[in-house]
Image (spheres, rainbow, N blue to C red):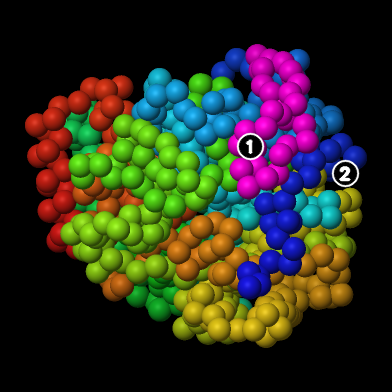
Amino acid sequence: MNTGVQNFQSFYGFKNTQMGNSGFYYEPRCKRQVISCFSPLKALNFTVLHEPQWSKQSLFSFNPLKKQDNGKFEVGFLKKVERRQKLLSVSVKSVMDVSKVAEKDEVAVGKSKGVYDAIVIGSGIGGLVAATQLAVKGAKVLVLEKYVIPGGSSGFYERDGYTFDVGSSVMFGFSDKGNLNLITQALAAVGCKMEVIPDPTTVHFHLPNSFSVQVHREYNDFVSELTSKFPHEKEGILKFYDVCWKIFNALNSLELKSLEEPLYLFGQFFKKPVECLTLAYYLPQNAGTIARNFIKDPEVLSFIDAECFIVSTVNALQTPMINASMVLCDRHFGGINYPVGGVGGIAKSLAKGLVDYGSEILYKANVTSIIIDNEKAVGVKLSDGREFFAKTVISNATRWDTFGKLLKKQDLPKEEENFQKVYVKAPSFLSIHMGVKAEVLPLDTDCHHFVLEDDWKNLEEPYGSVFLSIPTILDSSLAPKGRHILHIFTTSSIEDWQGLSTKDYEAKKELIADKIICRLEQKLFPGLKSSIEFKEVGTPKTHRRYLARDSGTYGPMPRSVPKGLLGMPFNTTAISGLYCVGDSCFPGQGVIAVAFSGVMCAHRVAADVGLEKKAPVLDAGLLGVLGWLRSLA
């Protein structure tokens, strides 16, 4: 069966990775900055394995592995650059190749010493944030990752001198201020820092009726451009975004922890009652409804739909107002900041920090079932028969994978039945990764583009709208000299790719990819097709196989107009000891959202294993109330 990516050694492939290569790094259009608020890192000791045993158990072979002490290396990513100079180059052979690092000998042979505080299934951003937050609190955590590197949809792969981000290159939560800079906080918690490059434009919209608008980093520049195109709706536009800021500022003022932990929740309410009541008021509301209170022009409302579609893959009427506000304001408050070396460095840093704090991560560890004993989750079983046990189990898989596969012998809990009545699996994506000659792009090209040329009705249709990232606009070290990366993706359903022969499957990939590339050539970059030097196409089947996501879905999508976030489950589940984290939990899809989910999950689990204060009576009452609220959705 062909799964969509040519020679998938490249998708998440392994070669020497450099966090920056002075041989082909040029100063981008904007200054670099470092997200850091702690002292320089000390040299770290770790073990590098040479000639790994790539058997069925891979790194976990019982055969002895050759080791080398590399304590002399200083890791921690890039130090602050005061002037133009060479970037620190870090080779995976010495430091960054996490698949060749033996975290613990007892784990390498599949025998743990005692029970863990938590086992995390999957190493997406949500799972890694939960794991590292727990490790910092003193928990003993084991992360089990099916693939050979961490990151999931925020991973990377290398091919022919290019470093490709698997998923989005639009990085929220990576600033140095506020409480919603959750990626920065997660890295800092484990002593890591990454150099980032500010993006001056979040996205450049190319929309029907020749409507074009740039979402500038500076909020005033953005609203000035937008209202200049719709002067008759200026007041309504400003009022809508003012509500977004009201919600964002309330959320950004709070210490973010678990909404399922009553001591924290009541403490925040007494400290910030107005902010908490503001969030409670908007919790059941959607962005489209709020927008229609102020805006009447259908084209402006369609633009708000496009804004929300980038956030949630649905229109504004189906996008919770809190979700929309987080993204539509954080892009101006903290800004979009791209990590030097690529998005994959975030997960690698978190994984390394996890190990530095005494916890463990296993790669090529395919969890096939969650072990239940006396109606409590107590461990997991891998495809090779190994079993690991813990006080708690955290699933970073989708809820469909968690309750439909990992718990396939269990009756579906009532709350999961309710969840699946309200939400369905969002579509997957067709993705195209390309390497092109740099001269095909104008010098003033923005990093991110959203293209919907003809009809607003095609916004949510398969292949209707196209999102394009060109991360080499910001970080030229990701590609060979004189080349750019284009990462193109558009919604696609797995049903569209079923039942095809290998020949027909490959032909269909090429046909659809060619049509999309032609659209971009006509709209943005004349001569694009002739400039292509590398191209790789992935389908929903690709994402299903290599990201272990049911149908390749990128998260839940409401069946109809939802009541804001009321129907979205939190981290706890109906099964004692089992928690969920990631994009099918509150607050939903997106890097900042799944990081928030990880922070909340870690706090709730820490309370349940005795690492945080806990009030059992209040717990039961709060969880009951939250369950009742979800039933209203």
In the image, taking residue 370 as reference, residue 123 lies left or right, namely right
Please report the residue visible at 90 percent of the width from the left and 40 percent of the height from the top: 23
Please report the residue visible at 27 percent of the width from the left and 52 percent of the height from the top: 569
Between circles 2 and 1, the one closer to the viewer is 1
Q: Residue 44, located in which quarter of the rendered image? A: top right
Q: How many marks?
A: 2
In the image, taking residue 114 as reference, residue 435 lies left or right, namely right
Q: Residue 178, located in which quarter of the rendered image? A: top left
Please report the residue visible at 37 percent of the width from the left and 27 percent of the height from the top: 115
Q: Which mark is residue 501?
A: none
Labelled pair 2, 1 in contact (Cβ < 8 Å): no
Span of residues in magenta: 42-71
Q: Which mark is residue 61?
A: 1
Asked if 210 appears above or below 393 in the picture, the reply is: below
Instruction: Please name the residue that numbered disc 2 is placed on.
Output: 24
Task: Give the residue type at disc 2.
Answer: Phe
In the image, taking residue 288 as reference, residue 535 lies left or right, namely right
Asked whether 43 falls inside the magenta stretch, the response is yes
- Measured as percent of width and height from the top left, residue 9 is found at 73, 56
Q: CA distance from mark 2 to mark 1?
A: 39 Å
Q: Nearer the viewer, residue 30 or 553?
A: 553
Mark 2 Cα within 10 Å, few/some/many (few <14, many 20+)? some
Mark 1 Cα within 10 Å, few/some/many (few <14, many 20+)? some
Task: Give the residue type at disc 1.
Answer: Ser
- Measured as percent of width and height from the top left, residue 188 is found at 53, 26
Q: Could you tell me which quadrant the N terminus lies in?
A: bottom right
Q: Main secondary structure of the magenta part?
A: loop
Please report the residue visible at 28 percent of the width from the left and 66 percent of the height from the top: 420
Q: Nearer the viewer, residue 263 or 284?
A: 263
Asked whether residue 459 appears in the rendered view, the answer is no
Asked if 630 appears above or below 30 in the picture, the reply is: below
N-terminal label among 2 and 1: 2
